[in-house]
Amino acid sequence: MRIYGPIRNNSWALALHGGAGGWVEELAVQSEGEYAQGLRDAYRAGSDVLEAGGTAEDAVVAAVLVLEDYPLFNAGRGSAVRCDGSVTTDAALMLGAGRAGAIAATRWARNPILAAQRVLREGDCVLRTDVPREQVAEWGLEVAEQDYFLTPGRIAQQRNVAAGLLAAQPHGTVGAVARDASGALAAATSTGGMVNQYPGRIGDSPIIGSGTYARDGVVAVSCTGYGESFIQGVVAHEIASLLRHAGMTLADAVERVLREEVERRDADGGIIAVDADGTVVIGHNSPAMFGAFLDQTVTVLV
Ligand code: ASP
């Protein structure tokens, strides 16, 4: 297990992840530099928002948008392919003030995090599955066909997993957590789910409290890894509970939850979190973790 932090940031704080599994051999462009570039671009998009006095919500959405558009990560374009050869996406956005929006098993939104943001804004429900094309268009969001999401590397990866040549690792899901200068927190997560998953399987990413959670005055958390364990361990909310009710530090809470809720289930994954003071912690028990945070300069984990 590796824990980075506590890292103390200034008036604002931002941390990103690009999944817990490491490189995907099948992806045509697979150099470390390409992954690092995606994380740097995303970090810049989010930190530009915060530097200009923008909100934590706008920062996490800006960062996740970049990673969704980047074909190496398992979110938006380049999402993991299901066993039926198609791509669906899951995404969640939660604001520390208490509101959340999420979408799951949805085909049509080119940028799933924007669809999750629409659900949050509408406010009449928290999680929508299989959002119809017409609804995505009505929200004023860009509609994309399967061709847009499917990349040759991800198609090859799914075939290799289906043929038993490769394990279905949780690769490339993306997430962001932020604290803005006013102290508000936000968390966002976006994924295509697990490679070769069956239609209708939904992981932790869009489940509020499991893969994504934020509460002002406490913490914002985004997770990646074997979603079933993160759901059963209610991982993101458990971290908040350890801070609130047990008075633990963020680093101790992340380490404990990885051990007791993820490792105990023989699973692996990673967590990014920022607390009310803007302290950032990143932890993972997976062999690798893509991440980005500010520690004097932008540090990228690949
Ligand atoms: N947590 C995601 C899921 O289970 C996968 C991942 O993090 O890559 O759907």
Image (spheres, helix red, strand yellow):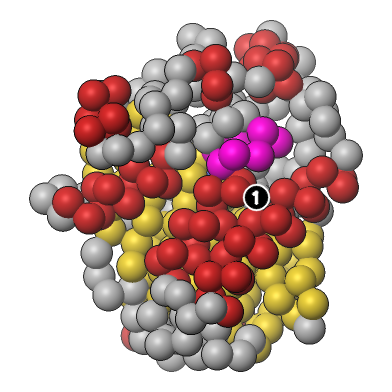
For label 1, the SS is loop
Magenta residues, dominant SS class: loop
Q: In this view, does 94 lie above or below 298?
A: above
**269 and 65: which is toward the camera:** 65
Left-right relation of 124 to 34: left
Residue 222 shows up from this direction: no
Q: Quadrant of residue 264?
A: bottom right
Residue 26 shows up from this direction: yes
**272 and 120: which is toward the camera:** 120
Q: Give the range drawn in magenta.
A: 68-75
Q: Is mark 1 within 8 Å of ligand 1?
A: no
Q: In which quarter of the image is the N terminus?
A: bottom right
Q: In this view, does 139 lie above or below 247?
A: above
List the residue tagged with mark 1: 18
**Residue at coordinates 47% horizontally, 86% vertically from top-left?**
181
Left-right relation of 70 to 100: right
Residue 182 picture location, percent across and down: 40, 87
Left-right relation of 85 to 205: right
**Residue at coordinates 55% horizontally, 21% vertically from top-left?**
148
Q: Quadrant of residue 299?
A: bottom right
Q: Is residue 233 above or below residue 220?
A: above
Q: Does the magenta stretch include residue 114?
A: no
**1 and 196: which is toward the camera:** 196
Three-letter residue code for mark 1: Gly
Neighbour class for label 1 at 10 Å: few (<14), some, many (≥20)?
A: many
**Residue at coordinates 65% horizontally, 50% vertically from top-left?**
18
